[in-house]
Image: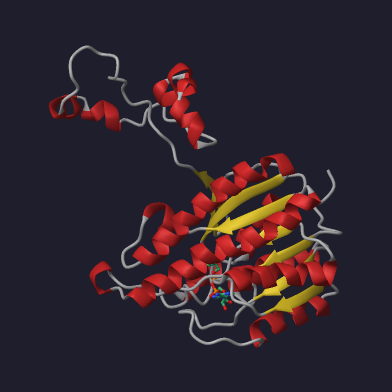
Amino acid sequence: MADIGFEGRVAVVTGAGGGLGRSHAMMLAARGAKVVINDLGTAPDGDGSTHSMADKVVEEIKAAGGEATANYDTVSTWEGGEAIIQTALDAYGKLDIVINNAGILRDRSIAKMTDEEWRGVVETHLSGSFYVTRAAFKPLRENNYGRILFTSSGAGLWGNFGQMNYTAAKLGIVGLMHVTKIEGQKYNITANTVAPIAASRLLGSVMTEQMMEALDPGYVSVLACYLLSEECTFTGGVFSAGAGHYGRAAMVEGPGIALGEQEEKVTVETIRDRFSEITDLGGAQEFFKSRDRLVEMVGPDLFSQG
Ligand code: NAI
């Protein structure tokens, strides 16, 4: 089989001035994509801004013989999302690939978290992924082709102490992916999510040097590039990746119990007595969209009446 290439493809990578975004962008460019390197150039907590982060990656790509254009807008406003996508259209005339990757951290335990810490993180990760995807959707639809990658986190999937803002945003991003997956289906637009673990400045303060070495971002980028390739038509997946481990995570629902048609009234005690069956995930399944689950819950007949 031929190697995977991105010749003729135009990609936007947000937060590509360092860490994972830089790694994804460099790999796409090395395989032929023209890449918009978006980065606001902030500190890890979102403070400040500089052009130098995006410029440096553009220079690196060009020095390696690739094509790239810098964009310095923030993902976290409507106008910023539009300007980022417009940069790709102005520079290269079309859009094929979007990686929503930009992010910041403002960790604080629940009771101590400030409104600014909450908003800053939710606006960058969740609103930012929405603004960029929304602006991208029209050109992708017109293109009748698109590959979108969202960036979640193990914290988003499973929770983490001191990260209520980040965890909420990162799980919200999985919701953005699900809707993109559904609305993109008829336009040949796929949407997947990566939950990475990789050495970057965001993790530098909590990891040993040895851990940082094992966590080469390139391990995540190879999965990202495959998911963004034309030959990968998988959509709606959440993939964990890091240190050479790859797997898929999913929301599943157990078969539960159906009490709606029994004659006796369902009471609190019924729930108590059957709680282990309700909790049991044996035979659990995932659903492509919420309607599929409703049909499974109440049956196709009842659902079609309403
Ligand atoms: P990083 O700090 O190296 O990269 C994030 C980049 O986003 C920075 O270059 C920053 O300037 C940029 N940025 C921040 N706010 C922005 C905004 N409003 N608009 C445009 N750019 C902005 O961090 P890293 O680790 O590479 O993170 C990349 C993504 O991966 C983030 O979404 C992060 O939450 C996620 N992630 C990373 C993990 C890891 O192990 N490194 C673990 C789980 C998730």
Quadrant showing the C terminus:
top left
Tell me if 110 is positioned left or right of 228 in this view.
left
Residue at 84% over, 65% down: 93
Render colour scheme: secondary structure
Tell which residue pokes out farthest to the top in this image. Answer: 263
Residue at 22% over, 29% down: 275
Residue at 70% over, 47% down: 189
Residue at 31% over, 76% down: 114
Q: In front: 304, or 219? A: 304
Residue 196 sits above or below residue 44 on the image: above
Q: Position of residue 233 (x, y in %)?
A: 70, 42
Tell me if 283 is positioned left or right of 78 in this view.
left
Quadrant showing the N terminus:
top right
Q: Position of residue 267 (x, y in %)?
A: 16, 25
Please state the quadrant of the image where ligand 1 appears.
bottom right
Q: Position of residue 84 (x, y in %)?
A: 68, 71
Residue 132 sits above or below residue 114 on the image: above
Q: Is residue 229 visible?
A: no
Q: Position of residue 186 (x, y in %)?
A: 71, 39
Q: In front: 227, or 273? A: 273
Q: In front: 150, or 263? A: 263
Residue 20 found in image quarter:
bottom right
Tell me if 125 is positioned left or right of 275 in this view.
right
Q: Is residue 18 visible?
A: yes
